[in-house]
Amino acid sequence: MEKSLKDFKSLLANRISGASRVFIIPHINVDFDALGASVGVAEICSHLGKSCCIVMNEQTNTMSVGIRGVYETVLKQYTVLAPEQVILGRKDQDIVVMVDVGKKNLIPDAIREQLPTFSRVVILDHHKEDEQTIQTKDKFVNLTTSSTCEMITRLFKMYGMKPNKWMSNLLLAGIFLDTNKLRKNTNEKTLEIAARLIRCGASIQDVNDLFLEDFEHDRAIQHLIDGTEFISHTIHSVAIIVNSQNPDRIYSQAELAQAADYLLQYKVDASYAIGLVGPDTIGISARTMGGMYIADVMHLFNGGGNEHSAAARVLNTSDVELVKRELLKVISREEFYAVKSTILEQEVENLEKDSEAVGENDFHQPQDGTKQIVKMKICTAAGC
Ligand SMILES: [Mn+2]
């Protein structure tokens, strides 16, 4: 049976209380949601009188100003260990609490290798599970909650804790990030939680300031957006962003995500930003207001996500146009849209048959009937 957050509140308290130490693991390429949730769990640990540390070691030079500032504050104010340091002085009853992540390919290698040596692995997340997801009974995963920071704020309330002003701003920043500033994946509960954080001292102005860009960073995103192509397909419209002018430019996954987010202000079922994120790795970031099953689309590229945000990484290639062509084939499939075009369905099926005939080497047909692209070695992107 599905666990309620109330059940999870007791479970988390039990697991933390029974632990020697708690290692808090956010996903790699931390964002406001992962940082806010990490700090939130650290506060819950100290509320329960338990020592803990946050495990991360991120490159700050590719971070935008807001996240870099928060990251540096966390380094100063909390115990933070690099993943490689966790192996030292380990105790039998040490546990791991993973926040905003449940997949083994989105946590540092050094932690993944050591996972079996921890007495418990607890997961607090809002992303869809797949074959990369770590198996544990100690979890709360809810895809309809806006963000991990929303879950943390609700847990704080249940534990009788009140976040200070700095933390309220950070938790609200996590919610803002994952809801595109309350424009998507937002319901009455999300707004109530946002209001609660404002009562605890969060300021919309402060949070907006955390999202301020430096000029160069913003130019990079706007330049990427200049490469947008709007693809019309039956009753659907999808925006795909590729920097065809300068395909060798390397972006951060966060920049791709921001570009995809930006496109949601237009009438599209979904937006996808494709770009190099390493010399031989291509990132895809997908966003939707709910018109398209983007987590399923990204799953075909071995990525994943939730109803509104998803991502994937394509390894061992630097050909962004090739990835775009693969994506174009996938988005022509009616099954990935929430509202189906029934009149044209047959026509689409025929089109699909044609396109599959042309590109049949790109697909294989597993037993379960789903199609997966196997031509390229691919893995899930960190965060979405
Ligand atoms: Mn999140």
Image (tube, grey):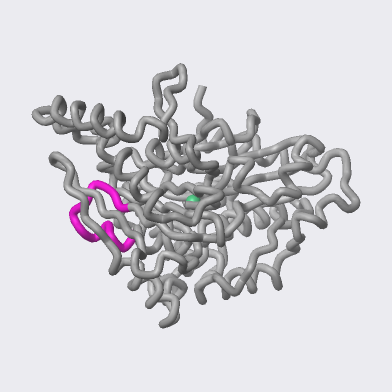
On the image, the x and y values in percent for residue 26 come to: 62, 53
Q: Residue furthest left?
A: 343
- Residue that appears at 33% across and 57% down: 182
Q: Is residue 269 magenta?
A: yes
Q: Is residue 149 magenta?
A: no
Relative to 321, residue 136 above or below: above
* Res 6 quadrant in image: top right
Question: 50 or 182: nearer the eye?
Answer: 182
- Residue that appears at 24% across and 49% down: 238
**Magenta-drawn segment:** 261-271
* Res 13 quadrant in image: top right
Question: 136 or 50: nearer the eye?
Answer: 136
Question: 286 or 82: nearer the eye?
Answer: 286
Q: Residue furthest right?
A: 89
On the image, the x and y values in percent for residue 245 come to: 34, 69
Q: Residue furthest bottom?
A: 215
On the image, the x and y values in percent for residue 185 come to: 34, 48
Relative to 170, residue 87 above or below: above
| Total marks in image | 0
